[in-house]
Amino acid sequence: MAISKQIAPYIFQIVSKLQEAGYETYLVGGAVRDLLIKREPKDYDISTAATPEQVQSVFGRRRSRIIGRRFKIVHLYQGREIIEISTFRAAPEPRKQNNSNSLLVLRDNEYGTSYDDAYRRDFTVNAIFYDPTISSMIDYTKQGLKDLATGSIRVIGDPYTRFSEDPVRMLRALKLVGQYNFTLTKETEEALYALMPQIALCSKSRLCLELEKILRKSYSDKILQAFQKHSFLQYFLPNLAKDWKTKSAQASIQLLACHCKRLEQEKCQDYLSVVLALISIPFVNKYLTKDETNCLWKYYPQLEKDIKKIIYYIFSPYSFPKFIMSAVTEAIILQQRFYKKDRPRKTRQHPHFRIAREIAIDLNEHFWKKPDLMSYWKSIRGGEKHHH
């Protein structure tokens, strides 16, 4: 399976340079998976026998930076892109039971061989290694290529143990289900259903980071639907799960799907604030006007505070930085002006004009359906800064 031609030339060069320095090196993980199913990888991960310090000595300190506490990796700068280079890892030592009887792995810093590294990975479809210099595929688990062909998510090793070691793996399994329409193998699904509540053992900041990553993807609507279908959403976003069957939540998912389609077609940017606003707007509308599709409420002094409360409610138990919350709230309030073509000069000077305009495009496409509205606002220039 020659996929070399699809790989960016600079990736080929990075792998070659490490190999020439005497280090076994492969392209790994999601990039190989995506290339094999004829999707364009969003980013490339490289795994090598070189330690982070050795990688840095190959590429120099100006081009590379060692990061990470739990496990050190190298960020290699290629123009505007950052390529992640990790050292082959061994499986973590089985953890002695602590007071909470948890198998949670807190440190994972042991170097190993490429074989060790493959078996330390989460799912078979993510453990296929590829050497682009000789077009060679290595499937150490002997199952990755088969599972990729059948669209199966299979945990490497015992799923109960692996999910207990790191409950975020359950979230990642369902992300693959949503993203690719893959299915969980029987053993993976049984472990996932049994251990879902353990996601509460993970830190809120780590889960919030996972949520941000999901919301920036062009398939975030499908991931949230997969979470709900497999009963995981109640542990991840409990309030959204509780309201899932309401008109507000369904309108939110439809707006998100509309945005995802535009993201897929590269017609918009992956601003977190736009997605937070689109999911929140039907709930804001319902609260203020009893109509999920309306954006025609009256301004009152408590409005900003009330909108923020609604956003916090939907995305509980996670919270976002104040500057993002302000951007989302102000962009939602601006929607009335967009709908009414109100005060265009003043509106275009607003620091969150561009975010608000992105939101209005999706609202117009899904709810308002005013044919000339966005051509009017697209012709308005200025005030385009502060994007999140």
Image (cartoon, helix red, strand yellow):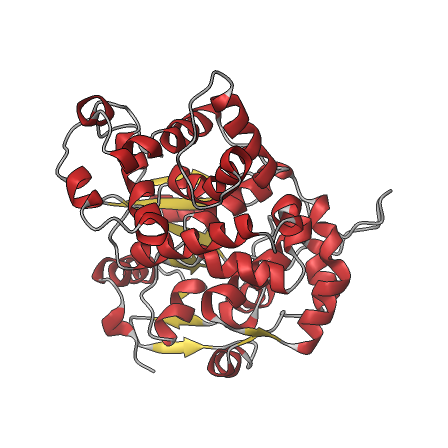
Q: Is residue 148 above or below residue 262?
A: below
The x, y position of residue 225, in whole percent, is 54, 60
Please, which residue is most extreme toward the right here?
99
Front in this rendered view, residue 185 or 358: 358
The x, y position of residue 325, in whole percent, is 46, 28
The x, y position of residue 129, in whole percent, is 44, 70
Front in this rendered view, residue 36 or 268: 268
Please, which residue is most extreme toward the top here?
301
Count of numbered circles in the view: 0
The x, y position of residue 120, in whole percent, is 60, 62
Residue at (31, 52) in percent of width and height: 365
Residue at (22, 21) in percent of width and height: 346
Front in this rendered view, residue 220 or 163: 220
Q: Give left or right: position of 340 versus 204.
A: left
Mark yes or no: residue 50 visible: no
Q: Quarter holding the N terminus?
A: bottom left
Q: Quarter holding the C terminus?
A: top left
The image quarter containing residue 133 is bottom left
Q: Give left or right: position of 63 versus 229.
A: left
Mark yes or no: residue 286 visible: yes
Q: Is residue 70 above or below residue 303?
A: below
Residue at (31, 77) in percent of width and height: 135
The image quarter containing residue 275 is top left
Q: Give left or right: position of 342 versus 72.
A: left
The image quarter containing residue 188 is bottom right
Front in this rendered view, residue 8 or 56: 8
